[in-house]
Image: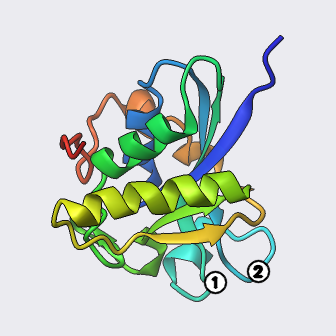
Amino acid sequence: YVMEKKAYFAGGCFWGTEHLMQQQEGVKEVVSGYMGGHIENPTYQQVKSRTTGHAETVEVTYNPEAVSYETLLKLFMEIHDPTQLNRQGVDEGPQYRSEIFYQTPSEKECAERIIGILKGKGYDVVTKVTPAGKCWIAEDYHQNYCQVHGIEPECHMRVKRF
């Protein structure tokens, strides 16, 4: 039995991040939620009002024997634009910021190394690297949004950066 792990990423609207992360081999589940704010159990309306400090975040449950944290990080940096500050496509506001929420020193080191690689390639990366807090699960209607509605993400597409 392999102990599953979780990873937390914020990169614009969680619908698109969730949809593209779900396609990665080794990923068991992706749940949309909110992290990085200062109130308990925030609602979408509260987060959208830009008063809670939360970012739209995905909780990725994965099998570390099938996919590495580094692979997930690189995927994350390719499915959103890490050079956009507090926005992704048409979505604007601090809740759409680019942020990696790490749980261990090695995750932090890995995130900083990947950002360093991108900066070395000339990308002006604004992605924050922050200790993970509690991930508040978003309302049911946000879960698997693209799949349920049969749509492709508007603000996310994979761009090869590595």
66 or 106, nearer to the observer = 106
- Is 132 positioned to the left or the right of 128 in the image? right
- Earlier-in-chain disc, 1 versus 2: 2
142 or 159, nearer to the observer = 159
Residue 110: give x, y in percent of width and height: 53, 52
Residue pictured at 53% horizontal, 47% vertical = 142
Residue 27: assigned label: none
Give the quarter of the image for residue 47.
Answer: bottom right
Residue pictured at 49% horizontal, 40% vertical = 70
Could you tell me the amino acid type at mark 2? Answer: Ile
| CB within 8 Å, label 1 to label 2 | yes
Image quadrant holding the C terminus, namely top left
Secondary structure at numbered mark 2: loop
Asked whether residue 100 is in view, the answer is yes
Q: Is residue 134 above or below residue 40?
A: above
Image quadrant holding the N terminus, namely top right
Give the quarter of the image for residue 13.
Answer: bottom left
Q: Is residue 88 above or below residue 157?
A: below
10 Å neighbourhood of mark 2: few (<14), some, or many (≥20)? some
10 Å neighbourhood of mark 1: few (<14), some, or many (≥20)? many
Residue pictured at 20% horizontal, 66% vertical = 123
Residue pictured at 78% horizontal, 68% vertical = 41
Residue annotated with mark 1: 52
Residue annotated with mark 2: 39
Q: Is residue 4 above or below residue 59?
A: above
